[in-house]
Image (cartoon, rainbow, N blue to C red):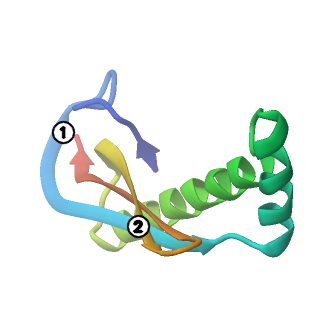
Amino acid sequence: MEVTTTETVPGETVATTLGIAKGNTVQSRNVGSDIGASLKNLVGGELKGYSKLMTKARDEALERLAADARELGADAVVNVRFETSEITQGGAEILAYGTAVELE
C-alpha cells in the first residue's frame, strides 16, 4: 500500500478515487512519563517519553488508515494528513486521513 502526502503517486496514474480513508487512535500519558516531564520542566529539553508516545500513536493511526483503504479496495492513499487533538486531560487523539485511490 503506497501512502503519500502528495496529490499523486510518483510514476503512477490515479484511475479511480474511492473516498476518504482514515485511521485514528487515542493515547494517554502514564505516570512514568508525567514524572519525567515534571523533572524536565525544571531543566528544559525534549520530553522523550511523550515523543515516543506520539510516534507510536502516529504509526498506529497510519496502520489503521492503510487497513481502511484496503477495505475500500485502494492501491494507494494520497494527500495524507495528520490531526491531533486533546480528548481529555492527559489523552490525545491522532487522526490520519487521505484519499483512497486505485492506480492504473
Closer to the chain start, of discs 1 and 2, is 1
Image spot of residue 64 (x, y percent): 48, 68
Q: Quadrant of residue 33?
A: bottom right
12 to 104, vertically: above or below: above
Left/right placement of residue 58 relative to residue 77 reads right
Inter-mark Cα distance, 1 to 2? 22 Å
Residues 61 and 42: in front is 42
Per the image, the residue denoted by label 2 is 23
Residues 51 and 12: in front is 51
24 to 4, vertically: above or below: below
Q: Which amino acid lies under the numbered mark 1 shown in the image of this protein?
A: Val
Tell me if label 1 and label 2 are in contact, CB under 8 Å.
no
Image spot of residue 85 (x, y percent): 39, 62
Query: Which residue occupies 32% across, 48% down?
Result: 77
Left/right placement of residue 102 relative to residue 70 reads left
| SS label for mark 1 | strand
Q: Quadrant of residue 70?
A: bottom left
Q: Which mark is residue 14?
A: 1
Image spot of residue 14 (x, y percent): 18, 39
43 to 32, vertically: above or below: above
Left/right placement of residue 77 relative to residue 84 reads left
| SS label for mark 2 | strand
Q: Which residue ends up furthest to the top in the rendered image?
A: 11
Query: Which residue occupies 77% across, 34% down?
Result: 44
